[in-house]
Image: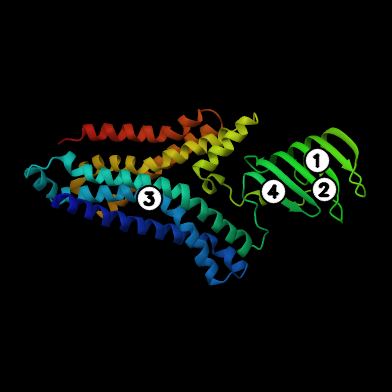
Amino acid sequence: MTIIQRYLLGTFARIMFLSLSSFCGVYLLIDFFGRVDNFLEHNAPASTYLLYFGAKLPLILSQVLPLAVLMGIFLTLGGFSKTNELIAMRAGGVGLPRIIMPIMFIAGLIGIGHFLLNEYVVPVGVKKFNHVMRVEVKGKPAALGNRQDIWFRDRDSIYHIDFGGNNNTLLHGVSIYELSATFEHKRFIKASSLVYTGDSWQARDALIREFNPATGLLEREFTTIQAQIALNKNPDDFSSTENEAEELSYAELHGISHQLEKAGLNNTKYKVDMHTKLAQPLVSLIMAFLGIPFALQKSRNINLGLGISICIMIGMAFFVTQSTLVAFGYAEILPPILAAWSANIIFLLLSGFLILSTRE
């Protein structure tokens, strides 16, 4: 690695980490003022504050990392151009491709790290800070959390659920083992699904077997289209977050999607989230491409305020575009893979056009 490349990468790294720290700090400050009422209302100790926001930090890093990469490359190249350092490099025989390639390589490595962060660290952190807010702050019972192969006990009954639905009001493949006071088998219910109707759970397409608690022998077996179930839980008990994709890794989303497809159920939401998990890490690389032409075109007037403004506008434009397309995927207007990758493709083509149109 040449001295110039080390100088470029060192400058880029400093600006990027400074931007990352600043964005995380602002995010935490805003989130703190949005959550502090909950902590104060329930008299939570200071350690709970630290645990909650510490567990949330991986998710915050994941969300602001592409913006920090964009800021890093924008201010690095823009600053070098403003101080005529780029002109000096190119006068010494170092072309623009040789200048930007090391930074793009680092942006690619950041994308790989971003995927690993989303796959192994963010789900653990999201589950932890949701548990802290739900159980330690609000005093609610712990959410079951799992989306498939769920086992739990409710009073004198043991439940097994193959997998939960998108909004937790629909549970698929439910088996219920009702026990007597002496733990003898009293009744078994096998239902295709449990549906929450607002105040109670209803079993659909259920097979019911009733046993004699004294002898354990089958007394009656029948099927019914609908039966009320005395389950002492509400949909909120099966998940601790509104956006469950944050709690699930790509492997978990793939597994749930496959289970739903095998059962002949709609798995569109999980397929969209699954492809989004793959598309999101590439945003850092796309933001790096997008920052190059903006940095070079605005170099004469570059300053910190302008850089922050442009980067935030680009980030907001990407976020709005991606959120809209993902919503189209959820609504089955677009295929899942297209809904997840379209924003990346649009902004990559835009960055390519801007780079090609930038004058040497």
Residue plotted at (17% across, 47% down): 300
Gap between marks 4 and 2 measured at Cα: 14 Å
If you read the primary sequence from the N terminus, does the residue marked by circle 1 or circle 4 appear first? 4
- Mark 3 or 4: the one toward you: 4
If you read the primary sequence from the N terminus, does the residue marked by circle 4 or circle 2 appear first? 4
If you read the primary sequence from the N terminus, does the residue marked by circle 1 or circle 2 appear first? 2
If you read the primary sequence from the N terminus, does the residue marked by circle 3 or circle 1 appear first? 3
Residue 186 higher or lower than 23, as above or below: above
Q: Position of residue 344 (x, y in %)?
A: 38, 35
Label 1–label 2 contact, CB within 8 A: yes
**Label 1 sits on what residue type?**
Ile
Q: Residue furthest left?
A: 92
The one of 131 and 294 positioned closer to us in this rendering: 131
If you read the primary sequence from the N terminus, does the residue marked by circle 3 or circle 4 appear first? 3
Instruction: Tell me the residue that label 4 is attached to.
Output: 151
Q: Residues within 10 Å of mark 1 (few under 14, many from 20)?
A: many
Q: Secondary structure at mark 2?
A: strand
Q: Residues within 10 Å of mark 3 (few under 14, many from 20)?
A: many
**Label 4 sits on what residue type?**
Trp
Q: Quadrant of residue 134?
A: bottom right
Instruction: Tell me the residue that label 2 is attached to.
Output: 178
Instruction: Tell me the residue that label 1 is attached to.
Output: 189
Gap between marks 3 and 1 measured at Cα: 49 Å
